[in-house]
Image: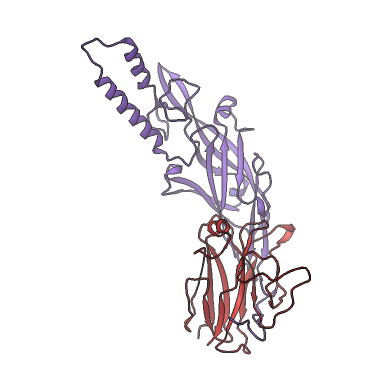
Amino acid sequence: MAQQHGIIVLFDVENALRTRSLDGNTYWFDNMKFLGSAGVGTEQLVTIVPGTHFSDGSQATEQVLNWLPAVLGAIPPTVPRNYLAEQERADDRRTLRELASLDGEGGVSDADIKRLQRRVGKRARKSGGGRGLTESKLLDVTGRTTSDSGAYNYPAPVITDITGPAVAEKIMYPAQYGSPDMIYDGWYWAATVDTSRPGVYPYTMHVQLHELVERNDELVWESVDLTCGSSLKITNDPKRNGFTGAGLGVLPLPPVPAAG
Amino acid sequence: MKHRVSIVVMVDAVGALSDRTLHNGNLSLVDDSSAGSMHQGTPDLVTAVVPGQVIQWTPIHVDVQTPVEIESIEFLSGVTAPPPAGQTVPPHPVDSAPFPAPGAVPGTEGDAMGSGGYENHDLLVWEGIVPYDMTPGVPYRYRLSLKLHEGSNSVLHIDSPALLRV
């Protein structure tokens, strides 16, 4: 039975935002190297998609692709997405508790106030009309409050579309699906492949990154839309019988079966 | 009589590779024969068959992103052929033997190589017709070898399943 393809796209978000390009800032991996995928780990990945057909020419195998984005230097995608929200809430609770325990009798020291002010952290808003991101505190990769603009955790890139020759020529039919897996925000991109036309077909992935900018004394997550690309290599062969190497035949039974 | 009997081979590829065995619940065989098969859901499935029926084996991976294919199905013979020189017959049952089953019936098996030198795990259809000269009431055990990904430890087998003419 056909194994589903997993294609992981690893983004260097920081460099991509600086250069405003994904060229040189993506790393592609799939689980098909053993069947002939080329360029695994680079940005020149060619994913092999082996197809088969029956003797009447009809498609015998349905191949499924799944794309999963990941970010270099961010919280790994295997950590649940609500981790940051939980950390933010826990941090707020801690701050409030310490605020309540500040004793007014002996006066409140400046140091205490400063420490708590730091803990309150900075909040980034989503830009007006922007999609996706909710207002949240800036946290670093360990989930701690940070006000250091270089240390915060980037939101995961969002795949917004998959286009290009492989789609236009109806080689694959990508779509975004709902998923119970909150690791990928409950959404993921997958495609089925028509393997009847062998060849190499490039495709373009449209990705939305998020950049933290300061505007009107406020921190705002602004979306930055970029594209990157990869290819599918389709092969196709007729199904054949495992026993005969050709068509259907009699099972190769021995004259005397082994004693059981 | 059903014209066709399906035997589904369900495999937990990760479990099998880390245990290095198809036992321990890593493999489950189920068929849809209506003639009284035994040990459904275990590696010891005995499929009740009738001559003329087409028997088809289909591998299914429990985890859809793991590769599972049938490497070979070899019926075990009561007349043991001597093993090739330099090889010893392992105590049975043993997993991951790279050489053919002792007394296995040689076939003209197809390999899983597709065009352009690319391996294709969906290429082979494992099906065959039950012959009329099959002895009734005697289980014909077969060695079911599965290939999970590639590499020297990728092929595992069991010798326990059988076909039984009723």
Give me the residue at 43% from left, 18% from top: A215
Q: Nearer the viewer, residue B73 or B138?
A: B138
Q: Is residue B162 left or right of residue A212?
A: right
Q: Is residue A108 left or right of residue A75?
A: left
On screen, B134 above or below A65?
below
Residue A74 seen anywhere in this rendered image of the structure: yes
Residue A127 seen anywhere in this rendered image of the structure: no
Give me the residue at 55% from left, 54% from top: B65
Q: Is residue A4 left or right of residue A129?
A: right
Colour in which the image shows chain B: red
Give me the residue at 77% from left, 72% from top: B84
Query: Which image quarter: residue B82?
Result: bottom right
x and y percentages locating residue A227 in the rendered image: 58, 36
x and y percentages locating residue A253 in the rendered image: 65, 82
On screen, A186 above or below B88?
above
Q: Nearer the viewer, residue A151 or B42?
A: B42
Colour in which the image shows chain A: purple
Q: Quadrant of the C terminus of chain A?
A: bottom right
